[in-house]
Image (cartoon, rainbow, N blue to C red):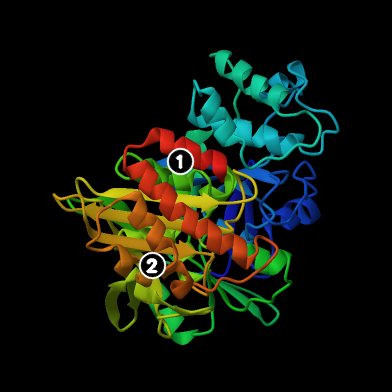
Amino acid sequence: MNDSIRFILNGEDVSLSSLRPTETLLDFLRINRHLTGTKEGCAEGDCGACTVLVGRLIDGGLHYESVNACIRFVGSLHATHVVTVEHLAAKDGTLHPVQQAMVDCHGSQCGFCTPGFVMSLYGLWLSNEKPSRAEIEKALQGNLCRCTGYEPIVKAAEQVSRIRPSTLFDPLEKTRSNISSRLWAIGNRETVTVSSGDERLIVPGSMAALSRILLDEPTATIVAGSTDVGLWVTKQMRPLNPVVFINHLAELQAISAGDKGFNIGAGVTYSRAFSAMAAKIPALGNLINRIGGEQVRNMGTIGGNIANGSPIGDTPPPLIALGATVKLRSASGVRSLLLEDFFIEYGKQDRRPGEFVESVFVPYPEDGVHFAVYKITKRRDEDISALCGAFHLALDDAGKVADIRIAFGGMAGTPKRARTVEAELIGQPWTEQTAVAGRDAFDADYQPLTDWRATAEYRQLTAKNLLLRFYLETSGAPQELKRFEELV
């Protein structure tokens, strides 16, 4: 057992033996370390003003990712390297090329969002020597600016990718070996328990330790990426005690591709899932690209998106439509069930005391099967879904519906299949007439609610229209699809 959270902050070793489980990295940086370059804008992971880099040893290599400090808990940082904007410039004050490019291209006006943009561009600079325009825009999805209109910032990214002097002092490249050795010395092999008054946080040293802890602490809050739990704290002011952090467990971060599908550990982030899955299941890759910004995708996990049971989680509908199964582990063993059966009702999942989501198996769509996912939001990028629908269709040799699975989020208290619609379509020829007739069956499957994201009427009509859209996309009728898009 260990009683201290240890990590590296820029170049300094940090050891904390007293720490509230819900203390955010943003507050720690600004209040405890007076590193005020990291700003608070939204406190919910949307604006990117708080962006920092976090480095971790993965598969023997040191990898850095941009994250939102406002919703990242300090307790999740054991054996990591945290890098803030203050660390970029040389000791003589010479700006890093990323910073200099922002100056040269007039990428800053009021300056409030600038440190966050610099850190996102720095993360891109470290990982991609020649990013395309699309890759630059993707890296900046999670950063908002009211002043510059983004074009100067994109130009700064393009400039810095063209100029990479070999003699450059880069604080991370020059110290990579040293940082790796220091992180390895800290390690994640012992369970860490840190208290602050009556509050406790626990960092399990192994999967076995996690199982024992959850058996002893059935009311503990499990935190992986904190992209959802972080808002419980920053927006709802909810006390969480004890908190068990699991984002460091290597067994939960494994993703493997077999002959029939992917096995995805519950700790696999959206970013890592995209890298592995996009080529095999392009529709899932397109969806992941629209989940939050890059910082959220670097933190959030597919297992967490499943485990929290949110009715508007983006990944459960497509995974249900694909026939995914979820594996649950506890001190007493392992059990598996269809993902659709994991969700019982709003706020309730089939997860017994002491159990946690260990992994999810996602089958590949078979040859000839049509699969599509539609995420409906008020803005295209970095927005929570009003509804999310997924369709999985197999036709027989006669062009009739042999099998179809339709799942929606945002239409009920849980992610849910449209069983009545499916029954209406199976055995019917896959025609526009069939799709139009099947629309009415949605009324038997869903009774959505009205909230600030969408009205019940909008959700119901949109779900019906998405069935028609899916038909048009799978029937080889581009003109009809264009007409449909113009109408809706």
Given contact means CB atoms under 8 Å apart, are the residues at marks 1 and 2 in contact?
no
Q: Above or below — where is 189 with respect to 164?
A: below
- Within 10 Å of disc 1 (Cα), the crowding (few <14, some 14-19, many 20+) is some
- Give the secondary structure at mark 2: loop
Give the image location of residue 42, x and y in percent.
75, 53
Disc 1/disc 2 C-alpha distance (Å)? 20 Å
- Give the secondary structure at mark 1: strand
Give the image location of residue 464, x and y in percent.
47, 59
Drawn side of residue 330 relative to residue 290, left or right:
left
Q: Above or below — where is 353 with respect to 323?
A: below
Give the image location of residue 422, x and y in percent.
33, 66
Label number found at residue 206:
2
Q: Above or below — where is 331 with respect to 129?
A: below
Label number found at residue 62:
1
Residue at the image point whose x is 39% and y is 79% from the top: 355
Q: Residue furthest front?
A: 433
- Within 10 Å of disc 2 (Cα), the crowding (few <14, some 14-19, many 20+) is some
Label number found at residue 135:
none
- Residue 36, located in which quarter of the rendered image? top right
Q: Above or below — where is 270 with respect to 210?
A: above
User: Which residue type does callout 2 highlight?
Assistant: Ser
Residue at the image point whose x is 63% and y is 59% from the top: 74
Q: Is residue 324 visible?
A: no
Residue at the image point whose x is 45% and y is 40% from the top: 62
User: Which residue type does callout 1 highlight?
Assistant: Leu
Q: Nearer the viewer, residue 202 or 179?
A: 202
Drawn side of residue 252 relative to residue 239, left or right:
left
